[in-house]
Amino acid sequence: MHPEPPSESTPGPVHSNPRLTDAEATAEARRIIEDAYRQPVPQMPTAYRDRTPLPAYGSTPPVPQPDRRIVPAWAAGTAVAGIGVGATCVGIGCGIWLACQGFAAVTLTGVLFVTLPIAAVAALATAIGSAVRSIKATHTETHHHYTGPVRQETNTITAPAYGLIARTRNELNR
């Protein structure tokens, strides 16, 4: 089955000669392109701005605007907490990095510069603790006066542990 050649009634190309030379093909292509650009493009507005002034007040009640959040509250809270934890980890990491940079350049002056304030705080805490203990010792006397009979019992406590996983049971023997 071979296609039939176009007859006079069948619409065919505009030109009677289907084979064009290169110069004719170039001229025809230019004519088609120029015709395409010569036709006006319909202009459609893409946006509209209402320039009428808004009334200062009116009788229309406010329109309810329901809350339609895309992200649930728990997910937003988790995201905020994650950001906080991440920022904290970055800060701690930067502090560790800075400390390691300082330890890499250890000198006697640097060691004294770091340890002397710590030693001063420790000495101050020890002095305050001693002063508080001496004040406390002068005001309170730890002498007990018992008025009733005293009975002393010597009890023995056994704590056996049995088995592979040890359980301790304290038993009071009198």
Image (cartoon, rainbow, N blue to C red):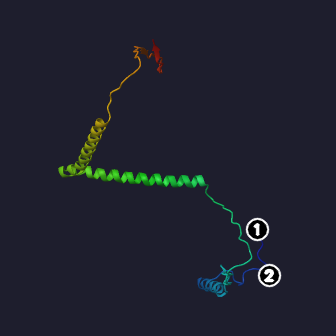
Q: Is residue 30 above or below residue 129?
A: below
Farthest residue, direction top: 174
Q: Nearer the viewer, mark 1 or mark 2?
A: 2
Q: Position of residue 76 (x, y in %)?
A: 57, 55
Residue under label 2? 8
Q: Are marks 1 and 2 in contact (CB under 8 Å)?
A: no
Residue under label 1? 2
Q: Nearer the viewer, residue 25 or 16?
A: 25
In this image, 31 relative to 131: left or right?
A: right
Q: Is residue 92 above or below residue 54?
A: above
Tell me the SS state at disc 1. loop
Q: Quadrant of the N terminus?
A: bottom right
Instruction: Please report whichever mark, 1 or 2, sits nearer to the chain's N-terminal start.
Output: 1
Q: Nearer the viewer, residue 131 or 115?
A: 131
Q: Residues within 10 Å of mark 1 (few under 14, many from 20)?
A: few
Gap in angstroms between the C-alphas marked 1 and 2: 18 Å
In this image, 36 relative to 119: left or right?
A: right
Residue type at tag 1: His
